[in-house]
């Protein structure tokens, strides 16, 4: 297949593709590399804390005992505003209770087993999600780079009219810049649907704060909760008067009786210990792409309805499907393996794109030796940094300074690459100066 575009259009597309790639290559490479690793987010948590109790299911009464046990440990401090219970799932068969101040694993009887310690997996997720920056800034930046990836994909197609016809033309054995170009183009073609899906969903997730704030300011008088209520459901009126803690066991029994086809995996207690407390249960719907449906209950256990993620408007169902589509949280291990392979391909496409531009500069007689060295250092430094932080987690523990370690390793690899190039050039220049003059 050949795309019928004029030579002028192709030249402009190549220029736009090169310019966009150079502007965002480093952070886009980092986002793609960490995104590939974070596909195994649940598996990394299990690897980090291999002695945490695991189970395929837990009784509602044991969950209630676990909640009461956790709240009892916080009796000397203000009651948490939200309490989350992660129920066992296929990917993460553990029961974990999280409050405003702590997170602990509980066993099948509801007893507290140990604190949750998954700081490395959380670091990796934060690095991908927001580049370890404050949430608003980092997620917005990642969202903008998702939009850049969409533009790069489209401009790349326009810049190569024969891109589909040459989809299986790979001169990998040449070992020169032609092989680099072929790897870049072939992997880019094979990952177009995946790249567009990941880029679009990543843009939607990353620009959540900007779009939500804009909608709230323009249509809801700055009320962010009111702006999001049509999609994720609204919060009932609060009442801070003291009240006994709710019993979640009847709500889980109700779900098992009335919605047996769903799989509850999260229980959320809002404002526990107050008269305005209420319960939400998040449940998966098999064979659906949505992350789940919110089932709302009063503090007394009366069912109040759903948010509409499963059967509401098209917009609600689309919003509920974005997260799973982006991270590959559907279809089990085969889908995760596919996401890892496609993610590695996208990471390679980004890395080789910059090398292709540097090769063009070399052919034009304007080499950037130190820029090439810096890029090599960063390309090697990102996976080296992730590996170093994992080693630090296993040797130094959950409190290791992962952010500092990661960026230090990246910086050291770049410096090492630059020093190697400088030493090589010095050696060559010295050898040339020592040649006899004829």
Image: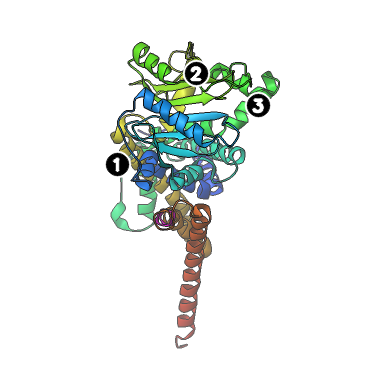
Crowd around label 3: few <14 · some 14–19 · many ≥20 (10 Å): some
Q: Quadrant of residue 36?
A: top left
Q: Is residue 388 magenta?
A: yes
CA distance for labels 3 and 1: 45 Å
Front residue (pair 253, 171):
253
Q: Residue at x 43, y 42 (%)?
A: 116
Front residue (pair 223, 180):
223
In the rendered image, residue 218, in percent from the top left (x then y), is placed at 69, 21
In the rendered image, residue 80, in percent from the top left (x then y), is placed at 56, 31
Q: Which of pointers 3 and 2 lies earlier in the amino acid sequence? A: 3
Q: Report the magenta stretch's main SS.
A: helix
Front residue (pair 433, 91):
91
Q: Quadrant of residue 115?
A: top left
Residue lying furthest right: 221
CA distance for labels 3 and 2: 18 Å
Q: Which residues are magenta?
A: 387-392
Q: Which of pointers 2 and 1 lies earlier in the amino acid sequence? A: 1
Res 214 label: 3
């Amino acid at each position: 297949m050949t795309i019928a575009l004029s030579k002028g259009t192709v030249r402009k597309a190549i220029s736009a593709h090169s310019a966009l790639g150079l502007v965002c290559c480093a952070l886009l490479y980092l986002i793609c590399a960490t995104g590939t690793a974070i596909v195994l987010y649940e598996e990394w948590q299990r690897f980090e804390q291999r002695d945490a109790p695991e189970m395929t299911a837990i009784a509602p009464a044991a969950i209630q005992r676990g909640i009461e046990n956790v709240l009892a440990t916080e009796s000397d401090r203000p009651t948490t505003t939200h309490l989350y219970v992660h129920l066992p799932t296929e990917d993460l068969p553990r029961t974990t209770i999280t409050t405003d101040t702590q997170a602990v694993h509980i066993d099948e009887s509801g007893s507290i087993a140990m604190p949750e310690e998954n700081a490395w997996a959380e670091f990796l997720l934060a690095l991908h999600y927001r580049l370890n920056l404050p949430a608003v800034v980092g997620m917005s930046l990642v969202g903008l780079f998702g939009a850049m990836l969409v533009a790069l994909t489209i401009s790349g197609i326009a810049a190569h009219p024969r891109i589909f016809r040459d989809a299986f033309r790979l001169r990998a054995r040449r070992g020169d810049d032609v092989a680099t170009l072929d790897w870049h183009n072939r992997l880019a073609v094979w990952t177009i649907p995946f790249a567009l899906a990941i880029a679009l969903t990543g843009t939607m997730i990353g620009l959540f704060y900007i779009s939500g704030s804009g909608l709230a300011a323009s249509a809801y008088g700055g009320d962010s909760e009111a702006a999001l209520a049509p999609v994720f459901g609204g919060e009932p009126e609060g009442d801070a008067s003291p009240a006994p803690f709710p019993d979640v066991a009847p709500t889980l029994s109700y779900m098992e009786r009335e919605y047996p086809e769903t799989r509850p995996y999260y229980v959320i207690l809002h404002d526990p210990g107050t008269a305005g407390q209420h319960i939400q249960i998040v449940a998966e719907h098999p064979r659906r792409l949505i992350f789940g449906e919110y089932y709302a209950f009063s503090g007394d256990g009366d069912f109040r309805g759903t948010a509409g993620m499963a059967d509401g408007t098209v917009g609600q169902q689309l919003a509920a499907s974005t997260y799973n589509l982006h991270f590959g949280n559907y279809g089990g291990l085969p889908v995760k393996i596919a996401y890892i392979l496609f993610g590695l391909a996208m990471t390679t496409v980004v890395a080789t794109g910059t090398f292709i531009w540097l090769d063009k500069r070399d052919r034009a007689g304007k080499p950037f030796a130190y820029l090439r060295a810096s890029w090599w250092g960063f390309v090697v430094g990102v996976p080296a940094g992730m590996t170093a932080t994992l080693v630090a987690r296993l040797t130094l523990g959950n409190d290791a300074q992962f952010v500092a370690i990661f960026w230090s390793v990246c910086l050291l690899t770049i410096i090492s690459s630059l020093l190697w190039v400088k030493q090589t050039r010095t050696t060559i220049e010295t050898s040339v100066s020592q040649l006899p003059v004829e």
